[in-house]
Image (cartoon, rainbow, N blue to C red):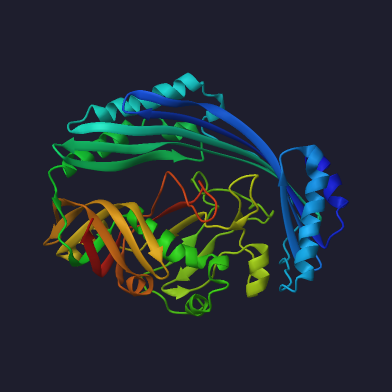
Amino acid sequence: MIEKLRKIVRGVEADFADIRYEIRRDTKISLESRELREIGSNTTDGYVVRVLRRGGFGIASVTRFDDLDEAIHRAKDAAETMSRSGAAPINMAACPTVEEEVALKLDEDPLRIPLGEKVSLVRHYNDLALGEPGIASTTLGYSEVYREKYYVSSEGSAIAERLLTTSIAGSIVAQKGSLTQDIRVAVGGSDGFARIRNRDDVFIRRARIAGELLEAEPVASDSYDVILNPLLAGVFIHEAFGHFSEADIIEKNPTLRDKMRLGAKLGSDKVSVHADSTIPHQLGFYKYDDEGVAVRPVTLMDRGILAARLHSRRTAIAFGEETTGHSVAEDFRYAPIVRMGTIFIGAGDNSLKDLLKEVGDGLYLLDGKGGQTSGENFTFGAQYGYVIEGGEVGAMVRDINIMGNLFTTLKNITAVGDAVELSERGGCGKGQLNIKSSLGGPHVVIRDMVVGGV
């Protein structure tokens, strides 16, 4: 396939052109309580063509090889129309020419596991959850996404890379009278089927938390000193800060662009933030983005100071900064956009016990549960929490929302834990879905966090 695409891209009359061909196979299994609601696999494929011509940029996608000439014609026509429109010319930052085939490195290949065995594993975890006291229902699903990507450019790059993510995830609902409480559960990653085997403890523990929430009191709305656990800290840093680190988000927003200028002091000295999709075996791992640029580790914030941002080739040259390898598409239907891969707060020096003592009295909040951002302000739900009294974990609380301003909150982080944990299931809906968007961090202490009941 690479040679066929190379031959075609060499014939494109343009300042730059690339073609991405992708085969995608999705396997899904879905249970609602004990009822099997969905099972099956679907394979699709297609091509995305991009053309840069006289400062105009055109994109077209097709699903058949025989239609590539038409796609190139449409992309060229779009580029020339854009060029004639008077729009600001587009340029692409230089990047090394690469020829490489990147193979999967898996601990037990999911593609070789019979579908029936996958169904049995989902049923097993589902039965464990339903067997715990107070559990009324479950929604649990298996997801397997295989992507086989081929990329060529008129500059000479030719890259083949295979990616595969596997997860079992869903929600567990407990009920007592008219009160219901739900907890999310997820296991998975990009390193093979072995990742989701022998995870009984996760499903049992999450079901028990759901049951315990039935006896918990709603949180009292107030301002608290809080500890966020790694996954809730990850949700905060992804949603409230990470998107502002994507160059295309702030590019046309002068106010945010000024606030997010490199060298600005945005957080406390305790806060460093990293984007690193080169970490092996993690959900957000990949080697090349969908523009053929090698992804590299990026320290976005260094001890409170904004140090870098994430780029496509277009935004890198527009900002006068280096490429980072963060231009990613959901699949063959889309052109790539600037996306986070693995983003997390860097580790500090404190154990959780140390952090509890530092807070003294406050709240310990765990795991994200939806939310929204509006400019630099955010509201997120926590799945559950505990009162902290005298530096010790006390009674469980429920129905929790946290809210605040990004920049104020970053400066109110006064201590950071010594162990980073990353999520096992991804998902980011910026324009397209990115299932390889992983997040996390250590435990963090935030002073004066506004907390409200749901």
In the rendered view, does 239 fall on the left or right side of 395? right
The x and y percentages for residue 45 are 67, 37
Q: Residue at x 54, y 55 (%)?
A: 431
In the rendered view, does 293 fall on the left or right side of 211? right
Q: Residue at x 87, y 57 (%)?
A: 13
Instruction: Choose between 11 and 274: the one closer to the eye.
Output: 11
In the rendered view, does 133 fall on the left or right side of 190? left
Q: Quadrant of residue 95?
A: bottom right
Instruction: Choose between 312 and 324: the one closer to the eye.
Output: 312
> Quick check: 129 above or below 114?
below
Q: Quadrant of residue 186?
A: top left
Quadrant of the frame with the N terminus: top right
> Quick check: 394 above or below 314?
above
Do we see residue 273 in this rendering?
no
The x and y percentages for residue 332 are 65, 44
Instruction: Choose between 29 and 187: the one closer to the eye.
Output: 29
The x and y percentages for residue 24 are 62, 37
Quadrant of the frame with the C terminus: bottom left
> Quick check: 37 above or below 232?
above
> Quick check: 382 above or below 130?
below
Do we see residue 285 in this rendering?
yes
Q: Residue at x 15, y 65 (%)?
A: 360
Number of numbered discs: 0
The x and y percentages for residue 107 are 51, 33
Q: Residue at x 58, y 66 (%)?
A: 248
Instruction: Choose between 276 and 208: the one closer to the eye.
Output: 208
In the rendered view, does 93 fall on the left or right side of 140? right
